[in-house]
Amino acid sequence: MEFTPPYKHSQFLTLFSPNAKYVASYHLAQEGFTRLHPSNSIQPHEDGGQGLIILRFAATMDILRVIEIRLFRDVLPTITEIGWSPDSTLLLAACATTGMILVWSVEAESFKAVIQVPGILTGPSSLAPPSSSSGSTPGSPGARHTNNNNNTPKPTTIPGLGVHGPGATILRGVRFSADSRHVLVWEEHLLRMSVWSLESRKVGSIQHPKATAQSAVTSYSVPPFSTLGTTATTVSSSSHGGYAFSVRADLQYVAMVERRDCKDYVAIHATEHFWTRPAIHTFAVPELMDVEGVLWSPDGRYLALWENPKMDYKVVVYSMEGRCHGVYQAQDTGNVGVTGPVFMGVKSVCWHPGSKLFVVGGYDQKIRVLNYMTWTSILELEHTSSINYGAKTVLWRESDTTAASGNMPIQGGVEYVKVEQPAQVPTVRIDTHKPNTKIGVGWCDFNSDGTLLASRNENMPNVLWIWSLAEQKPVTIIQQQEAIRVCRWDPSTPARIVWCCGTDRVYSWRADPNILGGDIEAVPVPAENFEVNSLRWCPEGGSLLLLDKDLFCLAYPFDENDQYTVHENTDSIFASR
């Protein structure tokens, strides 16, 4: 594995563009405020802070463009979110605490749009945007427009829907629409999703979008158009959660769950005009009392919806026309918990790449595999602390010593020992009397060809399970010394999965027909004080984005037989600052 030099960033806000050509990162170069004491109010600097959004070519890491943001002067105390448009021509940056969103074009440097979500400022006079940007709307990608007011370029300011009290519209989520010409904003407390057009400068809204906060969509088919929901922690919904919203793989339709009159409805919108026209179809979901989430199948034929885990363990499958194809409800086995039987519902979900299977991870530490013919469970995979699966299942355990013992060659100073079965893996004690107990299958996902399924059970945070559906049991179980933060399958190599544990190493496992249990690597990052807290694959595979709290770099996995060349990289622009 080869690495680029490390580059600075802040708040883990670095991500690939959907077309894999660019890497965007945000760096807080200078704080825009001071606070002498925690009880004192924030005092902005006279010059304001300085934030930098840096666009790089992903192949060489050469700098394409540097966008400077004068914090507080731009009415932005900081940046909390960045996101790419699906066509990779636009980039947004948002501040959730002020409701300010800035949009730039990659190709047309003169274009800049400013969106002020109402409720924070009292009127346009309170907005003080910079005077170094052009007032335009991207009628077509790369189009340039000029302003005739003394040839002084000004940003496009899109008016809001109205003025509301302070704090009423803290941003809960922001992302581009599927057509890349609208910005979707989920607003806190107002229970609506506003749609801001970058072409017509009009604003529409969809009322009562359904919020979710209990389960995680972990399917690899979810488009990574934004950093929303992707942080340095494990892949699970935070207390703020998201909204029940899913885009079909062809980007033609959007499914939204809406709450009206104490009932849940699914609204299907065409992405080309879904904010100017009503939904093309709306249907109720009487099988569920409180819909928690919705997810299109990769082939676009089915919509999977599931119940709030506090209510029941139930999954229903619909077509976009509103026809119910199947209902699955798990039975309470009463075998989970330490102080008594506990039965909660769905915690994580993912589709098989071929849309033939739907996998549900539950709070009962089991994975249930539903088939598309009958939508019933054809296989249950249980995460148990006692490991005894036979000779074809290998339990690798990371050793706490670097002394070689002949079990697995040392990789990056880490030795993996093959453990004889039966064996025990460590678990976290489940206290059902405490809120937000770490329990259940918090992450599960297929590899790109659907032959292997990886999972992580939250009360076994140090253990990675890799299952074979053909064998109906795990082929490899990997036990780490530290808790696993993030796991990701390689989109270009189905047999490879990588993960990180908050250490200075990146770990990878690859299926090898010549090695029982596969091949494991633990490669140290050649940078000082670099802890890998999160990682993301390039959409096309081939390179891996490694994220530290203050630094990031790219890694290039390769095999011994591969001829892979890493391009020369330019020095960081921060070296001269």
Image (tube, rainbow, N blue to C red):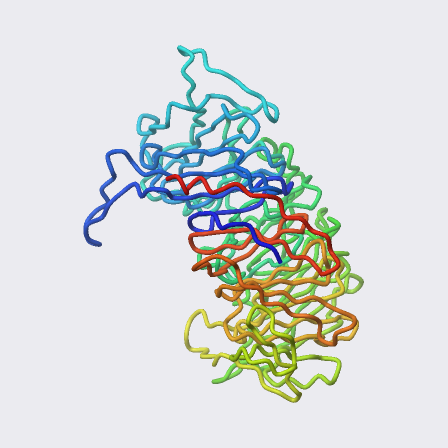
Q: Quadrant location of residue 433?
A: bottom left
In the rendered image, the residue lying farthest to the bottom is: 422
Q: How many marks?
A: 0
Q: Position of residue 220 (x, y in %)?
A: 65, 55
Observer-nearest residue: 500 or 123? 500
Q: Nearer the viewer, residue 382 or 5?
A: 5
Residue 387, picture quadrant = bottom right
Question: Height in image: 320 above or below 431?
Answer: above
Above or below for 301 versus 122: below
Using the image, determine if residue 314 lies above or below residue 260: below
> Residue 414 appears at what percent x and percent y?
56, 73
Residue 417 pos. (x, y %):
62, 81
Q: Is residue 245 above or below residue 349?
A: above
Looking at the image, can residue 399 be seen? yes
* Side of 567 relative to 470 (left or right): left
The quarter in which the C terminus is drawn is top left
Q: Is residue 192 visible?
A: no
- Front-most of residues 305 and 463: 463
Give residue 416's position: percent from left, percent from top: 61, 77
The residue drawn where x is 33% and y is 34% is 121
Q: Quadrant of the N terminus?
A: bottom right
Position of 38 compared to 165: left or right? left
